[in-house]
Image (tube, rainbow, N blue to C red):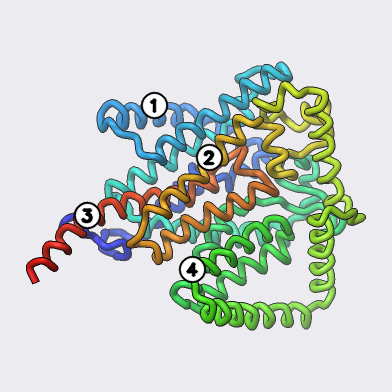
Amino acid sequence: MNILYKTLYTRDQPNFELKVLGIFIFSLLFTSNVLLQFNSANATIGLLMVMGMPFIFIFTGLYYYYKIFKLKELNPLDIMIFLALLMPFYNAIVVHSVFGVKIFKALFNLSGRFFIVMCSLIYYMIRTHKITIKQYVYANIILCWFCFFLYTYISLTISPESFKDSLGEGLVGYNPSKGGYLYRFSSAFLIFGMVYYFLDYIIKGNLVSLFLWLILIAYQVFIDKGRTELVSEVVPMFLYMFIMLKWHKIFKKLFSIAIVAGTIILIAYWINPKIIYFTADMYIMFLKFFLGKKTGEGSADMRWTEMAVVYNYFLKHPQYIFFGIGCPKRTVMLFNVGNVILSDIGIVGGLLSQGIVGVTFTYSLFLYPIYVFRKVKYFRKDVLFNTGLLGCGTIFIQSLFSGSVFYSPFSLMLFMLIVEYYRVKESLYKKYHLPNLQKDVLQV
């Protein structure tokens, strides 16, 4: 059977489950920041990442040599990842020129970001049919639930105050309105699961996916307590639903979601009413912050203060607005700029660290899913294709508030890989399937 005509949704490969498990382990170690985010709590993890750097550099050289000089082609995903690989060098050079930090030391602090090149290897394996897109998606779903159980277990059993020395390094934060110290785990794979289950429900009507989606939402609301993350995740999902469905279907889906979500809230209220009051107060504070009002909440008001610090810094040093100041360590930032945590202030932090050059490059990546959406016709209702599109849209909205994509585009490439796969799938469909279909119609 010609590989061009093999359907997407099959279990026709030998050792299907074993390959899914293999992709899961590979992604956990090489194409995610799940382990890297514990670097500030355990130096061993950072050491292991650095030890893997020679392998990463050797692989990168061999891969791009093979693609450029042997195959004589680079797909758009290869180009985006290659440019993303240059960003740590860019940041290291900028930090060196602005603060005098040695380039090698700056690269050492950003070493984990070079692992993004492994996304190219996964895509190459998919294109050569060593693995399938379905196996890739299943592996990411497993990673989603792995993160869910890992983060939940740590949050409920280990006090984040134990790692308060990591404050500002990304592992923990402090917010009195949320109970004091709390973990700031990466939501990349949780977002993947949310997007997939949400689309599986609104496109296919799978009620099981609705419950699984709400479980992940409940984690964000009651355990993670990330308000900006939740809003940036949920808003594009509902906007996407208004694009995908007709009005009568939208009301039907919204009614089902409201019934199930309402039941979960009633159960939580029955268990402990304080949980609901506490959560409601958090989101009232968020609404006030979003409207630009003083909230009286240290964490929310601090973000306005941080943005004011950035504004004053640019007034004093306007020359840095074009290239930024890079991603210096917390101590360097405190001494030279002020009490600013880059990931707290979204696009403002991105502008400070990356400058106009870096921000323009990052946001230019989001133009590609729009281009592919306009090109793809025959797979437009496909759940996986829409997972790639909506995932990119979610990361875009998230970048306005948290800005993690400016420092590590791992989460974006999770979805961009799917988008690129369907671009190729669409072109192959038009090239090989449509001519035969038209020929059959003429014969009839």
Q: CA distance from mark 2 to mark 3?
A: 31 Å
Q: CA distance from mark 4 to mark 3?
A: 28 Å
Residue 136, how many percent across, how many down? Answer: 40, 55
Q: Which residue is mark 3?
A: 4
Residue 177, how many percent across, how many down? Answer: 86, 58
Q: Evaluate whether residue 48 shows in this view.
A: no
Which amino acid does the dot numbered 4 rest on? Met
**What's the residue at 81%, 63% (across, down)?**
282
Q: Earlier in the sequence, mark 4 or mark 3?
A: 3
Q: Earlier in the sequence, mark 4 or mark 2?
A: 4
Q: Which residue is mark 4?
A: 244
Q: Which residue is mark 2?
A: 364
Would you identify the image quadrant in which residue 148 lies? bottom right
Query: For the residues carrying marks 1 and 2, which lies nearer the camera in this image?
Result: 2
10 Å crowding of disc 2: few (<14), some (14-19), many (20+): few
Q: Earlier in the sequence, mark 1 or mark 4?
A: 1
Numbered disc 2: secondary structure: helix
Give the residue furthest to the right.
296
Query: For the residues carrying marks 1 and 4, which lies nearer the camera in this image?
Result: 4
Residue 279 lies, with reference to residue 177, above or below; the image says below
Cβ atoms under marks 1 and 2 closer than 8 Å: no
